[in-house]
Image (cartoon, rainbow, N blue to C red):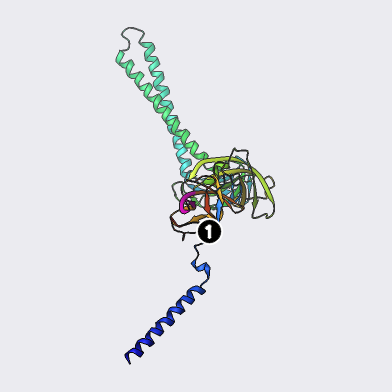
């Protein structure tokens, strides 16, 4: 009986052993083969690219007009959309207290001037009399001179105070500092305005619109492509789709924004017909010639993870990860700068699952 059981068990083991060998023989060859990598050469070549960057129109000059003195709004000569000239009256304020202060300052100056005139005349008479020996004591003459000088200083101080009060009165008439358009009006006749109010709305807002600034932030990686201020740049406005306009770089900030890693440039845009307005959105088409010292690889060869940006180089048939900095991208190519040489081989279909030191055939 035991011999029959042993025979059955042996037959079962032999059956499964043959089945495993047959299944192994029937497996596709691709399951046993090493991963297939597409390789590409590192080339010494720059990559030219046309960037499309967001931009915005801004007024060439703009100002928020706040009151310089406390007072009531007497008249408002302009409204939203009013075109004004430099020096044109925009508003008139009234301040009875300020008018009284001017009158008082004027009277004080007149009194001080009169006192100085008398003191000066008294000193000159004493000085003339002192030429007769013993007629005037030196102390009396010095006292008269000192009083005349003091009255002169007081007269000058009162005159300065009067002029200052007159200057404050001039602030009751609000004029345009430059030609432009009123874009905000927040007060009406009878309103009380205060020079001490902080974080409040301006009485008026004035913008120059016949001359605009097109402001665009250029990425740090392409800043070097800006050769000079005469470079021509094309742009399209969202309000006028399909209409391409051109401009020249007028100003370069020469400063990299630490948060966005970009540099602000500006183009002058002239708006004689008034068709454009500050705040309009634009797309700037910027031609970047690329870095002549950069290398280029297929775009798919660059692996970007949360920690690093790298390419996988085949060295001695092993995968080596090399950190790189990327630049322009165009036609499936990407500029890179890193510790590798032109002519080296990289994995074109790279991904972060490829391990360092993996065998590359």
Q: Regarding mark 1 in the picture, which secondary structure is present there? A: loop
Q: Between residues 295 and 141, which one lies in front from this camera angle?
A: 295
Residue 247 lies, with reference to residue 6, above or below; the image says above
Residue 192 lies, with reference to residue 103, above or below; the image says below
Does 314 appear in magenta? yes
Q: Residues within 10 Å of mark 1 (few under 14, many from 20)?
A: few
Q: Between residues 177 and 312, which one lies in front from this camera angle?
A: 312
- Residue 357: image location, x then y, percent: 43, 55
Q: Is residue 117 left or right of residue 332?
A: left
* Residue 13 makes an appearance in the image: yes
> Which SS does the magenta portion mostly show?
strand
* Residue 80 makes an appearance in the image: no
Label 1: which residue? 37
Q: Between residues 351 and 54, which one lies in front from this camera angle?
A: 351
Instruction: Give the quarter of the image for residue 121.
Output: top left
Residue 3 lies, with reference to residue 144, above or below; the image says below
- Residue 287: image location, x then y, percent: 62, 46
* Quarter containing the N terminus: bottom left
Span highlighted in magenta in the image: 313-324
Does 20 appear in magenta? no
Q: Is residue 24 left or right of residue 175?
A: left
- Residue 228: image location, x then y, percent: 59, 37
- Residue 236: image location, x then y, percent: 65, 51
Q: Is residue 306 left or right of residue 188?
A: left
């Amino acid at each position: 009986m035991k011999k029959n059981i042993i025979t059955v068990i042996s037959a079962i083991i032999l059956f499964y052993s043959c089945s495993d060998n047959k299944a192994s023989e029937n497996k596709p060859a691709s399951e046993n083969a090493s991963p297939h990598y597409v390789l590409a050469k590192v080339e010494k070549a720059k990559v030219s690219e046309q960037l499309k960057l967001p931009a915005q129109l801004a007024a060439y000059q703009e100002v928020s007009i706040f009151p310089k003195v406390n007072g009531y709004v007497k008249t408002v000569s302009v409204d939203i959309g009013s075109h004004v000239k430099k020096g044109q009256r925009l508003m008139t304020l009234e301040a009875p207290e300020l008018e009284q202060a001017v009158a008082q300052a004027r009277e004080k100056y007149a009194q001080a001037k009169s006192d100085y005139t008398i003191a000066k005349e008294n000193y000159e008479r004493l000085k003339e009399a002192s030429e007769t020996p013993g007629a005037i004591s030196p102390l009396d003459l010095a006292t008269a001179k000192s009083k005349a000088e003091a009255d002169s200083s007081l007269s000058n101080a009162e005159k300065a105070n009067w002029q200052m009060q007159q200057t404050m009165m001039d602030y009751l008439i609000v004029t345009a500092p430059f030609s432009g358009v009123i874009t905000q009006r927040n007060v009406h006749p009878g309103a009380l305005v205060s020079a001490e109010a902080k974080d409040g709305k301006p009485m008026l807002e004035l913008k120059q619109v016949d001359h605009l600034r097109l402001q665009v932030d250029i990425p740090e990686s392409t800043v070097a492509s800006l050769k000079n201020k005469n470079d021509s740049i094309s742009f399209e406005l969202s309000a006028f789709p399909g209409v391409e306009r051109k401009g020249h770089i007028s100003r370069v900030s020469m400063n990299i924004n630490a948060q966005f890693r970009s540099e602000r440039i500006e183009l002058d845009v002239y708006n004689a017909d008034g068709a454009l307005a500050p705040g309009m959105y634009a797309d700037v088409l910027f031609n970047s010639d690329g870095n002549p010292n950069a290398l280029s690889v297929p775009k798919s060869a660059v692996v970007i993870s949360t920690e690093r940006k790298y390419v996988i180089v085949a060295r001695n048939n092993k995968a080596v990860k090399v950190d790189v900095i990327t630049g322009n991208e165009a036609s499936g190519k990407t500029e890179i700068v890193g510790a590798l040489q032109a002519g080296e081989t990289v994995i074109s279909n790279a991904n972060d699952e490829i391990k360092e030191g993996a065998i590359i055939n």
